[in-house]
Structure formats: structure tokens, C-alpha cells
Image (spheres, grey):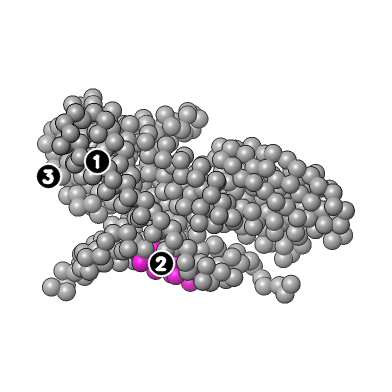
Amino acid sequence: MTSTIVTALLFDGLFAAGAAIGFCLISNPQRNAIPICALLAAIGHALRYWLTHYFELDIATASFIAAFSIGLLSIIFAKLIRCPAEVFSFPSLLPMIPGMYAYKTILGLVKFLKNTESDVAVNILLDVFKNGTTATFILFALVVGVAIPIFIFHKQSFSVTRNKLVGK
Amino acid sequence: MNNKPEIQELSEFLSEYTTCLMAVGVQTSRIARNSARIAQAFGYTTDMTIFQKTIIMSLKSDETNETFSSVNKIKPMSLNFEVNSMLSKLSWETYDEHLSLDEIKKRFDEILKKPRISKWIVLPLVAVGNACFCRIFSGDMIAMLVVFVATLIGFFVRQLMFDKHINHLFVFIFSSFIASFVAALSKIYHIGATPDIAIATSVLYLIPGVPLINGITDIIDGHVLAGVSRLINALLLIICIAIGLSLSFLLLGLKSF
């Protein structure tokens, strides 16, 4: 039983890492940040998978916890490699962006517009509302989750790009 | 500061610097902080208002109270994380090492001249990434392959059209259409067990993730206007993706999910 969970988590992490590399390359990341982004994305996404599948947590709360751990880890790596924590945390969040919920909301609205039967329309409306709120909640959960560690370690995270610490 | 630059000269550089940061996708509070830091290093204070297309900035000398205001257009550049972190680094270097303005300008140009990762490397990796994404949404191996091909073609078209500076909304509609059309062919010819997942994930490489994250970050930081305008821009792009999808559904006579 536990081995199936472990393999499921490993595979989820592996594919999330692949997705993160692909999506962050569009935004031209620093070369040395790419492997770390992949690692953080794998950890974050696998954590979310674990929470939603084995703890039956809702996806927004799970995203929040995943993003929070990505934020913490990215601050640690930011200190080690000396670049802003966002360099790691942003691309690692990309696989968790609720893209499909977002465009399904729009498609549902179009479907609602075309529909003429009122009992079907209620179901479509429910779908639209469900997809829309899920997308919004995940998005907020991701950003707030990643930002909280940065607020906690305020001073460190703003000055990591500094080369030497000069007394002012 | 002995070699204090002219207010106009510094303002020109800062406008270049901030519009560049805005274009490569940096959150608003970081832009304000970085430029205030550079200004402070030369004995000036700066305040700015940032909109989606322009930045209004005023620069004030601490000694003479002389002020200089300017409105600067944001240039169209594509997202670039590397420039983001290098330019943040530059602001600290200016502050700590007391660099002269000429030296900063030289380093700034060097940072901007750095070549992007070759598009021939990006193209296959984006396709692999999107195929991986298809697996996360529980598509089978064949669906992954379909998504790989669809993304390869769609992203190639996107790169071509971006290089030709075609309106970006149109680019999004068209590349979403191409990618979903290729993926939808798998449904028509009954390839694989999960063609619906293939179609649904084939357009996800277009989702504007960075503007969405930046928009929410800005709103939380209190730059509500800047954040909302970023979010509306991202929403427009998502609508374009949906239009492209609907177009291929319409052309192939498929039912929308």
C-alpha cells in the first residue's frame, strides 16, 4: 500500500518537474536556477497531490500548503545561490497555475450563452461558478502561500542579491 | 557624493531601467524599491506611479530640492527572469559599490544584450513540459504524444508570429487554435483512450502564469490598480485561448466540454 503511494508521488513529482522546466523556459530563467525550479516544483506538486488524494483536502488549501513550502525552500536556495527568491518560486508555481479551470470558466460562459433549456443552463452555471471560484482561490492560495515566508524573512529575502553586506 | 550626476541624466537612465523591469515581468513593489535604491545612491529620492503602458516618475534632489518628472512608455519586451534578477543585483551594486552612472549604464546595456536561451532548445522542452502536464491530468501515453506534437506545432507558430510582431491577442487565438486543432484530430481519428484530456491540455502552454502571479502579488502589496490591470490583461489572453479552442471545436464539429 505504501509503495503505491510512494510511486504515485514520485511520478507526480517527476512530471511536475518536467512541466515546470518547460513552462519556465518560456520566460528565460537563469541557467543555474532551472534544476532548482524543477526540484521545488516536484516537491510542491507532489505535496499537493498527496494532500488532495490521501488527506482529501480541498485543492485550494492543498495549493496553499504546497506554495508555502515552495516559498520556504526558495528562500533557503536564494541564500545559497544569491538571487531573488522569486527566481525559484515563480517558475515552480507555474505547473500549479489553474489554467484549465480558468479557460473552462470562459468556455462554460459561452456554452451558457448558446444554451436554451433552462434545466441544463443551471448545471452549466454551477460548473462555471465552480471552475471560476476554484481558479481564483487556487491563484490567491499560491501567491499568498509563497509570499508568507518572504514576509517572515523580510530582510533576508530583499537583500539576497547584494554581493557584500556593508554597514550603513 | 562627489560625482553627482545631472538630474536629467539620472532620470533618463531610471526611466529606461524601470520600463525595462516592467516589461520583463517584475512585480511593482520590487520596481519601486530597486529604482529608489539607485536614486538614493546618488542622493536623490524618487516616487512613481505605474500603469500598464506608462510609468510616471518624479525625481527629487535631496540637497537642492530640484525636481524632475517624466512619463515613460513601457516597451514591448518578452518575459525574462534572468534580466529581472540581474537588474535587481545591479541596483544593490550601485548602492554598495558607489558606481558611477556611466558604469551602471554600461552594465545595464551588457545585461540587456545577453542572449536568450536558444529558441530551438526552448521549443522541444516546452513541448515535453506540456506533455508531462497531460500526464498529471491523467492522460495516457498516446495522449502525451499527441500533446507533444500539438505543442511543438503551436509553440513554433507562436514563436514565428512573435518574431514578426503581430498583435499578441491574435497570436494567442491562432496558436491556441493550431494546438487544439492538432490535438482534436486525435479524437476524430480515435487515437488513444483519453483524447479529451489531450485537447484540454494542448493549449495550457499559453496560460499567462507570470502575469497572473504578478497581478495577485501587486494587489496584496497594495498596488491595486497595477495588479488589476495585469490580471485583466491575463484574463484577455485566457479569453483568447478559449476563442482558439472554440474555433477548432467549431471547425471540426466537436462538442465543447
Q: Are marks 3 and 2 on the same chain?
A: no
Image spot of residue B151 (x, y percent): 31, 40
The three-letter amino acid code for the residue at tag 3 is: Ala
Q: Chain of mark 3?
A: B
Q: Residues within 10 Å of mark 2 (few under 14, many from 20)?
A: many
Residue topped by disc 2: A68
Q: Between disc 2 and disc 1, whose residue precedes?
A: 2
Measure how far apart labels 3 and 2 are at the Cα level.
36 Å
Disc 3 to disc 1, how far (Cα)? Answer: 29 Å
The part of the chain drawn in magenta is A65-77
Label 2 with label 1: CB-CB less than 8 Å: no
Whole-number angstrom distance, CA of label 2 to CA of label 1: 32 Å
Q: Quadrant of the N terminus of chain A?
A: bottom left
Q: Amino acid at mark 2?
A: Phe
Q: Position of residue A14 (x, y in %)?
A: 29, 61
**Secondary structure found at label 2:** helix
> From the viewer's perspective, is the residue at label 3 or at label 1 nearer?
1
